[in-house]
Amino acid sequence: MKSRIALGVVIAAAALSPLLLDPRGYWIRVLAITLLFAAMAQAWNIVGGLANQISLGHAAFFGIGAYTSTVLLIKFGISPWLGMFAGGVLGALAAFIIAIPTMRLQGHYFALATLAFGEVMRVIANVWTSLTGGPGGLSVPFAAPGFWDYSFKLLRPHAYIALAALVIVTAIFEGIRRSAMGYRLRAIRQNPAAAEVIGVDTTRVKLQAAVISGALMAMLGTLYAQVAVFFDPDTVFGIAGISIRVALIAIIGGVGTAAGPILGAFFIIPLEEIMNDLLSSRAAGLSQLVFGVILIAVILWRPRGFITVFDSLRARRSRTVTP
Amino acid sequence: MSFVQAILDGLLIGGVYAVISIGLTLVYGVMGIVNFAQAEFLTIGMFVAWFAWAFLGLDPVLAAPLSFAVAFAIGWVVQGQLIARVLSAPSVAQIFLTVGILIVIENGSLLLFGSQFRSVTTSYQTESLSLGPLFISVPYLIAFAMSLACGIALWWFMRASWFGRAMRATAQNPAAARLMGIDTALMYKMAFALGVGLTAFGGAVILPYVTVFPGVGGQYVVLMFTVVVLGGLGSVAGAVVGGLAVGVIQSLSSLFFPIQLQNLVLFVVFILVLAVRPQGLVGAIR
Amino acid sequence: MSRKNSVGTMRMNRRAMLSGTAALLAAPYVIPAARAEAPAVNVGVIMPLSGPNAQFGINSRNGLELAADEINAAGGIAELGGARINLVVADATSTPTTAGNVAQRLITQADITAVLGAFASSLTLAISEVTERRDIPLLTMSFADQITGRGYKNIFQVVAKASVIGKAQFDYTAAIARGAGSKIDKIAIMYEDTAYGTAQANGLRAGAKAANVEIVMDDAYPLGITDTTPLVNKLRGSGAQAVFPVSYLNDSLLIIRTMRQQKLTIPAIGGAAGYVIPDFEKALGEFSENVLSIDTSNYDLAPELTERFRKRFGYFMVHEALEHAVCLEVLVQAIKKAKSAKAEEVASALRGARFTGGWINGMTGGAVQFDASGLNVLSVPLMVQWRGKDIVTVWPKEIAKSAAVWRT
């Protein structure tokens, strides 16, 4: 019961916070980006947390989504909302294509393969200039403000859309986790051989997780395109900026849990912004350096993520209770 | 003729790729950790060599052992203080610890040295030898020769010295090695420090034809991984084969495809190898 | 100290009050600066101050500081009560999306009248997305065609566009070669792959096509390229008689060095940027001698203006410094015309207008005239050549300071 109330409070706070911030200001933008990255990390979490496949190439799907909806908008005038679903389909397809040869790979090998796949997409986007605008990037065309055109003069609607996206992706995550599919994924995670023996089609289940994750990630790419209004291959297909960052957010927060990506995003993104704000004028690189130091410190302190802080608190509280 | 020229250039560069990447495979082979910060030690090696050139007038090739030593020292401390603490943590934490180290080194370099591109001017930089219709770029040749010397030294070290054999034992079976009286913690430090030292050595050696700036290491990351995966993660001999292969593939692909696609071919090869033969062409120690 | 003669204290106080009041009344006549200060005009300056283009960003900032200091020393903007120019400088870094974020941050944190930046076309494009949506004028010397090609109302470019510059790069070269009795039939184009290189390459292609010259090599290369050997290999094999590289600094050095290494002596005609800053000569020494490059302006056309830069900063006034000084000059004149520092009003004063005088005298065309898209239609490219540590204007003949040297 207590956790339900806590959840309710958190949701209410989240729903109200965009209203408290200056709509033309800087922090509403940070909030929108934070919520978006939390949703992205949650999408990654489906593969990284539930299926225990550490993907370092999720930017591939993200970029596919961003480019699909924007190219459809530029070339055919299709609304980004529809373009988002088209991107989702392509993202799912891409996930399917990359998952087939790599699902059997373990740990590091899988991470490296996905890394390479992300880079492949980036190079393709850089070279296929007629479609993607190449390294020069794409600008989302100016449109008169309107909901169906996904164009807003202020940032508040973007924050709300990102919030809605986060809620939806988290719901899907939880839905999978509690379902039969989640049960099978857990079995695979703990002992793949045993899972096969009891009849779990490991390849199919992992493929399903990958496809869902890829589709969601791609759809979030559209959200990014609409709030950033300009992007290039290095940004949306970037290893450091997207792939590693979303994995990092989920991991720092607590991989495999629903709250993990949210905690991680609300820690990392505002921290980065504050660092940049305070320190980047002093010396280039200082803010990122401090961020790196904090990252190392956090990993050394809590290798399993922030979420374990709650576990240890809970353990301390219930120490008198026999398990 | 440009075909043969491309293969020649590819082999020369490939030798250097091998030396740069051996460190990565050594670290994985002995400790089981994929060190994402490995390429940053390339940057460190290049900067050390550049400063040796700027202030001491040392040719980068002569400064290479200095780069090795500096990186070795830094690696020793990094392993002991940071990496050793996550050896038993989930591999995910290990990966991201090294990512944190990457961020620290890259931005530390940016803060310390500034963002401008620095290059050296050496007497042989614009020289080339003629072998019939072929050109052998002298900087490439010297880099290759140094890499070869380094490779031979490493081979001798791993085979003949006690440390080398102890490291290989640790890689094969840490528990058994401990029973044999080998201090595995020390071996891990050795392996890591040696590994990053080698990468730094490679950096110094390529300075005559590559410009250094804080982000230069980042450009070699995927390339290094391709080398070690092609050869087999953990196999030193594999890194050599992988390095040469990658050099040639890259060089040839620049003939047939636009320069921008040079790395695309490499990545596709990378994914295919992982999909079809993850243990690489030569196979791993473990 | 506390036990003072009460009468004495009162007298002290009254004396203090009287002298204080007298001072206050006298002050405006004695200390002119004590007059109420007009609020400063905040001008955002977003340049790459880190990353591969840092040197260009620093040069640009230096040019702006020189211009701003001179304006402030002369009493600021009279029409606004002597308001001083306050340059609010931010690092665009080298990634377009960061530049966009920096622009967002800058605009929300200070009351900005206009933004000047960001040298590299890719960065300027990203920043323009922000400034256009916030109705803040952006003045720039970046010249990729896209900058003025999107129908944006708040962008103002003081130089010709890339395709025009690229075409001039080819046409002028052909004219110089003809003058030396050489004929070019085969050329090579290589360019860095961001907005700048791509747009200028289009111009080069158009020029070559119009002259029926064969393009035997046409390659884009990634901006951060670290080894140009494969590129130059291809060049050598292509049989080109002249090569037109469009590069920033690092790639320009690599290309020239590698060409020398492979004993390739065909003329290289640079595309501005890396080929026309002091660092080029510093790094290449004798190999920089007689290298030609297209440029959008040059300091030797107005030494009475540009030598001030050399005196203060110790190197010749590179074109980005001069052109940014021109941007500030144009902005200040627009502010004077609008008698306001409000972004929208200044933008209206800029649109479609003509400006002359001050730093603008250093531009080809002698004046700045913006058309409906924000492009300065009077700017004409020129060809420069390295002579020792200086670059000299050699084409068109009417403005050349020296005859071009063509060596094969």
Image (spheres, rainbow, N blue to C red):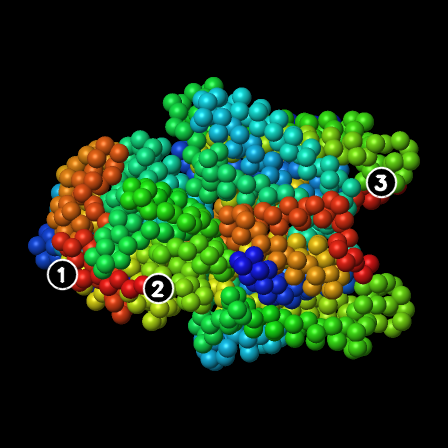
- Note whether residue B275 is visible: yes
User: Residue B203 is drawn in which quadrant?
Assistant: bottom right
Label 2 amino acid? Answer: Phe
Q: Which mark is nearer the camera, 1 or 2?
A: 2
- Residues C103 and B134: in front is B134
Label 1 amino acid? Answer: Glu
Q: Chain of mark 2?
A: C
Mark 1 sits on what residue? C304
- Residues A281 and C3: in front is A281
Q: Residue at x 27, y 70 (%)?
A: C388
- Residues B58 and A261: in front is B58
Label 3 amino acid? Answer: Pro
Residue A192 rendering spot, x and y as whole percentages: 85, 40
Q: CA distance from mark 3 to mark 2?
A: 60 Å
Where's the N terminus of chain A, which quadrant?
Answer: top right
Mark 3 sits on what residue? A192
